[in-house]
């Protein structure tokens, strides 16, 4: 994903109308003054963009004024919510679950997540066929501990149906202060019956990078009798956020010292399971640790087919160390870029489950009033030109997790076995 500042962004009247019509986008600004619930809307706007200048917007204002005058419960008439709803309707008309409008609170929550700390249940959410799905629960989060899994469909939040909810609605309902409770009605992927799961919200602190070097006999969650004294290294990467590159550099330097540059270990395991992605530039930074400088990491394809490449731009410390990457259905976006790049350069073996399949790139715009817009600007391809969107990366060795025995990490165990065989 790309993130950058948009500068001054104004919301003009006409975009609201286009939101409901659902075909066009523009830049608009609207000022509303309400007096005793009577029609008293004052509008200040610029000339509409040429693409929407021929649209008749009278029906929008007819509906707005009828709601204002005739709706029976005047306490429900919140102009800011109506504004947000109109914008969300326009964005959702694109049918792209990753192009989203975030009102101020949700936009702030998103930024807090990338910065590494927020309050909630700790799960990355997405949209699929008008349903809220879990892209990935964060490692060690209340969501994960309660049994939320990647690929779960969230049917209800505290008894309220999520059908046709936007992502911002879901985030607003599910997040909350530490110590508060939320009940989710979940349909696990592959199950026929729903499950109600109560989760106590907490402060979610995200450490992007964790690492260790251990003898095989010391690794929790695996049961390998032979070669117990051989050592392997492990790096777990939970997201690509604000602090990821700094945390990665610190961890990889320490790891290099502990392993003499990888000379006294059997190999390295990079764990990208349940990593929902983040900054595109971070994916190139991480990939540079394992492939030669100048190697293509990802291909960006814009509208019209114009392509550009992002390459490894530094000398990595583990260019020749045997490498395994763990992926699952919670591995998305930037984590798929890393896995796909290293696979195409024949640098790695992928183990686990088919990844999520998010093959598009978003840019985050600050709209100047606290709100934000995440807009899909391109699709990305692996160095060999593969588009994984809605397909995912297929691992070289498929290993499913035994949901009945979560104390045994069969995927990690298989990775270790591949390194020592």
Image (cartoon, rainbow, N blue to C red):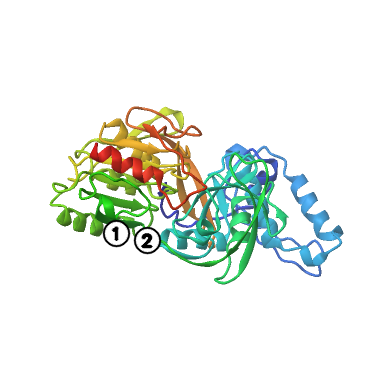
Distance between the Cα atoms at labels 1 and 2? 8 Å
284 shown above or below 343: below
Q: Can residue 298 be seen in this view?
A: no
N-term-proximal mark, 1 vs 2: 2
Residue 115 lies left or right of residue 297; in this view the side is: right
* Residue annotated with mark 1: 247
Secondary element under disc 1, as helix, strand or loop, is helix
Q: Which residue appears at 43% of the width and 58% of the height?
A: 114
Residue 168 lies left or right of residue 346; in this view the side is: right
Secondary element under disc 2, as helix, strand or loop, is loop
Measured from the top left, where is residue 285 in percent x and y? Answer: 28, 47
**Label 2 environment density (alpha carbons within 10 Å; few <14, some 14–19, many ≥20):** some
Between 45 and 191, which is closer to the camera in this rendering? 191
Are circles 1 and 2 on residues that touch, CB within 8 Å? yes
Q: Which residue appears at 17% of the width and 45% of the height?
A: 315
Return the mark for residue 207. Answer: 2
Measured from the top left, where is residue 209 in percent x and y? Answer: 33, 56
Measured from the top left, where is residue 316 in percent x and y? Answer: 19, 46
Q: Can residue 169 be seen in this view?
A: yes
367 shown above or below 311: below
Measured from the top left, where is residue 113 in percent x and y? Answer: 46, 60
**Label 1 environment density (alpha carbons within 10 Å; few <14, some 14–19, many ≥20):** some
Q: Quadrant of the C terminus?
A: top left
């Amino acid at each position: 994903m790309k993130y950058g500042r948009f500068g001054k962004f104004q919301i003009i009247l006409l975009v609201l109308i286009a939101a409901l019509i659902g075909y066009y986008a523009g830049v608009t600004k609207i000022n509303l003054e309400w007096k005793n619930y009577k029609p008293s809307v004052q509008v200040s706007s610029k000339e509409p963009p040429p693409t929407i200048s021929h649209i008749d917007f009278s029906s929008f204002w007819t509906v707005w004024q009828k709601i204002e005058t005739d709706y029976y419960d005047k306490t429900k008439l919140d102009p800011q919510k109506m504004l947000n709803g109109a914008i969300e309707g326009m964005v959702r008309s694109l049918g792209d679950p990753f192009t989203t409008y975030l009102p101020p609170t949700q936009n702030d929550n998103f930024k807090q997540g990338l910065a590494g700390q927020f309050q909630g249940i700790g799960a990355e959410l997405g949209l699929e066929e008008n349903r809220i799905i879990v892209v990935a629960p964060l490692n060690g989060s209340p969501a994960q501990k309660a049994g939320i899994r990647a690929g779960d469909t969230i049917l209800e939040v505290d008894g309220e149906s999520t059908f046709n909810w936007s992502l911002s609605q879901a985030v607003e309902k599910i997040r909350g202060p530490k110590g508060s409770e939320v009940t989710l009605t979940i349909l696990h992927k592959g199950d026929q019956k729903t499950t109600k799961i109560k989760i106590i919200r907490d402060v979610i602190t995200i450490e992007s990078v964790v690492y260790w070097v251990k003898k095989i006999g010391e690794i929790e969650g695996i049961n390998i009798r032979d070669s117990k004294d051989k050592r392997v290294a492990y790096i777990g990467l939970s997201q690509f956020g604000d602090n990821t590159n700094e945390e990665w550099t610190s961890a990889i330097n320490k790891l290099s010292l502990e392993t003499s540059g990888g000379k006294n270990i059997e190999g390295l395991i990079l764990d990208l399971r349940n990593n929902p992605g983040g900054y595109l530039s971070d994916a190139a930074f991480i990939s540079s640790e394992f492939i030669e400088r100048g190697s293509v990491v990802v291909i960006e394809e814009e509208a019209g087919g114009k392509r550009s490449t992002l390459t490894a731009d530094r000398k990595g410390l583990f260019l020749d160390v045997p490498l395994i990457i763990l992926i699952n259905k919670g591995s998305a976006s930037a984590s798929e870029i890393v896995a796909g790049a290293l696979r195409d350069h024949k640098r790695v073996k992928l183990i686990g489950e088919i990844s999520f399949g998010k093959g598009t790139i978003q840019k985050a715009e600050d709209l100047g009033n606290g709100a934000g817009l995440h807009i899909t600007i391109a699709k990305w391809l692996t160095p060999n030109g593969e588009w994984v969107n809605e397909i995912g990366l297929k691992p070289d060795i498929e290993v499913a997790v035994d949901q009945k025995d979560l104390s045994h990490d069969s995927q990690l165990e298989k990775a270790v076995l591949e390194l020592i065989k």
